[in-house]
Amino acid sequence: MLKKRILLKIGSNTLTKDTDHISRGKIEDIGRQIAALKEEYEFIIVSSGAIAAARQFVKLEHNGEEINIKQALASIGQPHLMRIFQENFRELGLFTSQCLLSYSDFEKEQSRVNIKNTINVLVANNFIPIINENDTVATDEIKFGDNDKLAGLTAALLSADILIIATNTDGIYTKASLLSSAPKTIEEVTDLSDLLHEIGESKSTHGTGGMQSKIDAATIAQLAGIETWITNGLNDNFITDAIENKSTFTKIKAT
């Protein structure tokens, strides 16, 4: 039986559970769900969190550009983040690998072929690729997209069946419901232009992407025939609950 392929994008706020520290419990929760679903689904993860991981251990002093400090923090935090994934997943019988990519990699045909071939070999051998932006050489993700665009591009390149973007809300809310302080989720949509007037400009606590970057990622995925789910990663079992329709989230249908 062919497994369905899920590209799971996890933001910093999900991994920290909206605190100042990477949550081992949240990473264990993600691993436990993947282990429960592995007979029917194969997973590729795009994960933020390197900078948040570094800030648990160090405080860098520098008079230069803020972006340079963030790049240095990413360099320090990436090995810590991977270690936490590896330790928690290994206890569940799951194996992980690290892939650091830049948006420029997707602009070169040979690089695209190499990425696809390498990740397909890893998945075929039951390794879960954990992808992050190569922050020390590329600044776009730190400044703008919080890995959302990278997740969309990767999902399209690897022919995922579903792109799941974990965030800290129950999907995308209607603007009117936010104004009335009673958030109401837009549960299903096909025309992405319908969402554009509903979103605000707010950014997340640790990450740099708001809902606009998630819609941008969904646009890339939709053009590739991939459905996007925007779910609340702060909830336990947010992947399995979405698959079993036990939770409220936004589903952006493929065209």
Image (cartoon, helix red, strand yellow):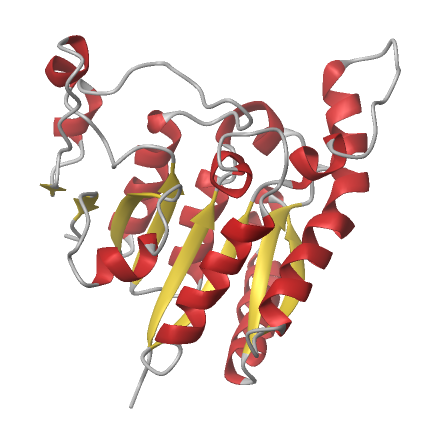
Residue 124, placed above or below residue 157: below
Q: Position of residue 3 (x, y in %)?
A: 33, 80
Q: Is residue 56 visible?
A: yes
Residue 129, placed above or below residue 100: below
Q: Position of residue 71 (x, y in %)?
A: 76, 31
Q: Position of residue 83 (x, y in %)?
A: 73, 58
Q: Give the residue displayed 13% in from the left and 34% down from the top.
A: 186
Residue 185 shown left or right of residue 52 in the figure: left
Residue 179 shown left or right of residue 58 in the figure: left
Q: Give the residue displayed 88% in from the left and 14% down from the top.
A: 62
In this rendering, the count of numbered labels is 0
Q: Is residue 225 visible?
A: no
In which image quadrant can residue 5 be found?
bottom left
Q: Give the residue displayed 30% in from the left and 34% down from the top.
A: 215
Q: Give the residue displayed 61% in from the left and 48% down from the top.
A: 132
Residue 14 shown left or right of residue 170 in the figure: right
